[in-house]
Amino acid sequence: MKKRVLIMSAGAGNGHIKAAAALEKSFAADDRVVEVINNDALQYTNKLFRDFYSKFYESLVRSAPNFLGWWYKTSDEPWRTDRMRIMLDRLNTKPLVRFIQDFDPHITVCTHFMPAGIVSHLIATQQIKARLSIVVTDFDFHAMWLSRSFHRYFVALDETKAYLEMLGIPPERITVSGIPIDPVFQLPIDRSTARLSLQLDPLKPVLLLSAGALGQGPTEFIVERLLNLNRDTQTIVICGRNDELRQRVTRSVAHQSDNFRVLGYTDDMHKLMKMSDIFIGKPGGMTASEAIACGLPMCVVSPIPGQEERNSDHLLEEGIAVKCNDLTTLPFKLQRLLDDPAQLLRMRENALRFANPLASANIVETLLADQLPHMSFSKHQQAAIAFAAKTEGAGVIAKMPVPLLSIKKSPISQQARHTALLKRHSNAYKKGS
């Protein structure tokens, strides 16, 4: 039987939307799918709720990134903010619920935790029969991605899968797919031809500076630093949808216009990345996945505290990126890289080895062939997950349900109690509870 597929994202950050678009292309190309719909869940909510999820988030990225980092860390505890978040979601997403029920999908894939929570609730209360799969769009896993009822998780790294297994999620429910990127990133290009199309010298190094889709970050200051490079380089500056930023940058580089190309939002990022030698920008999960698929070494600047800092850690650990903690030293960082072609080659090779350019196609194939039923966490299992996520057991036991309190009474170490709890958790799955 051909499947109806619903893909849901949320326009709070461009990565969730782009991941959903990549999945839509792969599902639409498969003849086992009769219909695929890709929607931004926020379009079914009222303006106040949309602004809370999108514009408020964007304003915090610009003006209070440290607060975002604090919130990311504070809320990274299973189910801690779940009740309030689910209540707000349900109060403001009734049109979304009606749409999902009317479409009645066989497969639902969410690239943001907000619609995942809604779909999970509909499945748990038997309002729909769809299977819910969740595609995590950063390298690490945050507690907000947890759903009480789900079918499968798709994650970027083996380490992320290991983390979820330690929480007690069955390994057969976790697929290491990578973050889905547009299939166009698989297409080869001729670097010289691509450079010539922008009137760039095919033989000189090309730097790619991105301010993201929204044109945020210290782009102008970075451009000032690049003007001080003691190297004959060419720079492409992507200003996103920020026309004012584009105009200011264009004016600031006017005296070196031969070495700069200042662009707005573009759908040709795959070409720009493949023609470049170093990427300069923030390590969002989608941006990083696109860059490594192109074998493009990265210079990480101004990561958002929280998920982007964690993404940066993985890129540094794998030898794909360098990080510039102080933008005043950016010319030094770049100069050292450009003067060491062997290191740039190693970084390029590391990126290609780390990449998962077929993530979208692999996710689609897995879901269309999958026979696993959906599963739901009982209250006991939710408590076990919360306990397993704790780095310290102190102060947790008192908050646990009575059946779990008995574990504390046995004269064994905290590690042994943890192991016993996870074993009980695993056995509960096997019994189908």
Image: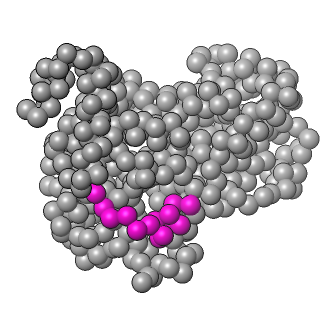
Foreground: 154 or 425? 425
Q: Position of residue 88 (x, y in %)?
A: 17, 48
Q: Residue sitting at 88 percent across and 37 percent down?
A: 204
Start-end of magenta stretch:
362-375
Q: Is residue 433 above or below residue 225?
A: below
Q: Does the magenta-highlighted stretch encompass residue 253?
A: no
Residue 418 visible, this orientation: yes
Q: How many tags in the picture?
A: 0
Q: Does the magenta-highlighted stretch encompass residue 368?
A: yes
Q: Is residue 222 left or right of residue 258?
A: left
Q: Is residue 163 left or right of residue 237?
A: left
Residue at the farthest right position = 203
Pick the quarter of the image with the N terminus. bottom left
Foreground: 298 or 402? 402
Residue at the farthest front position = 411
Residue 399 visible, this orientation: no
Q: Residue sitting at 80 percent across and 57 percent down?
A: 189
Q: Residue sitting at 48 percent across and 52 percent down?
A: 175
